[in-house]
Image (cartoon, rainbow, N blue to C red):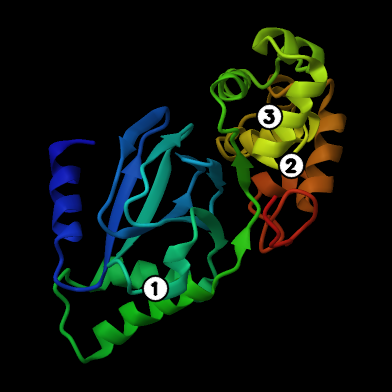
């Protein structure tokens, strides 16, 4: 983050208004180091895909979606490819019950997207109170609060040994992952590892690896890499096997996703448009 971006961020954080917006872009290959905001933050991906990591897991944010990060939650952001973001900062307490939960990816309706874009393009940081400008910003907060959560979440284990194994897998998702090999590396029995993994993530190890590969594949597809390249680099034996798994999970094919045809279907692993978070 350069000095200009930092100055803009500090202005937004200190805004006298409870809702403020900021436009920013991230170059491909950029990772924003762990940091904390005083305000709650909605990061909306106008173009590209980003990955937000925080305690409890990672959240993949494809184009047209957004991730909510509550105030005071340490998080880091990775942009595998170029990402254009529009960020909404909201004063603690303004959204009520939403702030009691953790991070979540939400669907951005056409209305919410247009409200955010309009606020960025037309409204000053110290917009007048009591008029159209304040009503527009309040409506942004209302739309964020009512948006359903999507299951684009990869839970991370709490234990040090399991976390190390998972992070290594995320760095190279093409690696063959077996319960026996992970148990050997963690110095645990297969039964103990399986039990701990399920307890700490809510998923068995095989399901977690499948979910990780699919979520990570979104950024490669969004960057324009071929289906063959993405499939092989994420541990699939063929493009057809990857396409079948992708369609089962998201309800559309990788080609449709690359063409921007996701619409409202790109919701949760396990079925199109499902709001259930695993």
> Residue shown at 24%/73% (left/top)?
18
Question: Which SS class for mark 3?
Answer: loop
Q: Is residue 188 visible?
A: yes
In the rendered view, does 29 fall on the left or right side of 214? left
Q: Is residue 64 visible?
A: no
**Quarter residue 1 falls in:** top left
Q: What is the x, y in percent for residue 172?
A: 62, 18
Question: Which SS class for mark 2?
Answer: helix
In the rendered view, does 62 fall on the left or right side of 272? left
Q: What is the x, y in percent for residue 5?
A: 19, 44
Q: Is residue 260 above or below residue 89?
A: above
> Residue shown at 53%/65% (left/top)?
108
Which one is in front in this view, the residue at disc 1 or the one at disc 3?
A: 1
Q: Which residue is mark 2?
A: 254
User: Which of pointers 1 and 2 lies earlier in the amino acid sequence?
Assistant: 1
- The circle on residue 76 is none
| Alpha carbon distance from label 3 to label 2 | 10 Å
Confirm or deny contact between disc 1 and disc 2 (CB under 8 A). no
| Alpha carbon distance from label 1 to label 2 | 35 Å
| Alpha carbon distance from label 1 to label 3 | 41 Å
Q: What is the x, y in percent for residue 253?
A: 78, 46
User: Which of pointers 3 and 2 lies earlier in the amino acid sequence?
Assistant: 3
Q: Which residue is mark 3?
A: 226
Which one is in front in this view, the residue at disc 1 or the one at disc 2?
A: 1
Q: Which residue is mark 1?
A: 95
Mark 3 Cα shell of 10 Å, populated few (<14), some (14-19), many (≥20)? some
């Amino acid at each position: 983050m350069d000095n200009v971006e930092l100055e803009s961020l500090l202005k937004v954080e200190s805004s006298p208004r409870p809702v403020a917006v900021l436009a920013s872009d991230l170059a491909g290959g950029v990772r924003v180091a762990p940091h904390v905001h005083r305000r709650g933050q909605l990061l909306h991906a106008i173009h590209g895909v980003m990955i937000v990591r925080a305690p409890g897991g990672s959240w993949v944010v494809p184009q047209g979606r957004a991730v909510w990060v509550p105030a005071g939650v340490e998080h880091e952001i990775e942009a595998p490819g170029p990402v254009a973001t529009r960020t909404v900062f909201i004063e603690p307490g303004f959204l009520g019950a939403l702030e009691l939960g953790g991070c979540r990816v939400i669907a951005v309706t056409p209305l919410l997207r247009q409200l955010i874009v309009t606020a960025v393009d037309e409204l000053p940081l110290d917009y007048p109170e009591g008029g159209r400008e304040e009503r527009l910003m309040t409506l942004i907060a209302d739309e964020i609060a009512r948006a359903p959560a999507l299951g684009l979440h990869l839970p991370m284990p709490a234990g040090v040994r399991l976390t190390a194994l998972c992070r290594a897998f995320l760095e190279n998702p093409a690696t063959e992952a077996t319960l026996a090999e992970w148990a050997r590396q963690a110095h645990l029995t297969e039964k103990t590892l399986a039990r701990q993994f399920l307890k700490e993530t809510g998923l068995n190890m095989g399901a977690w690896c499948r979910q990780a590969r699919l979520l990570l594949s979104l950024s490669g597809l969004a960057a324009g890499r071929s289906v063959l390249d993405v499939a092989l680099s994420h541990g699939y034996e063929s493009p057809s096997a990857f396409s079948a798994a992708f369609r089962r999970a998201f309800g559309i094919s990788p080609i449709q996703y690359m063409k921007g045809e996701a619409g409202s279907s790109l919701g949760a692993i396990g079925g199109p448009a499902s709001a259930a978070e695993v």
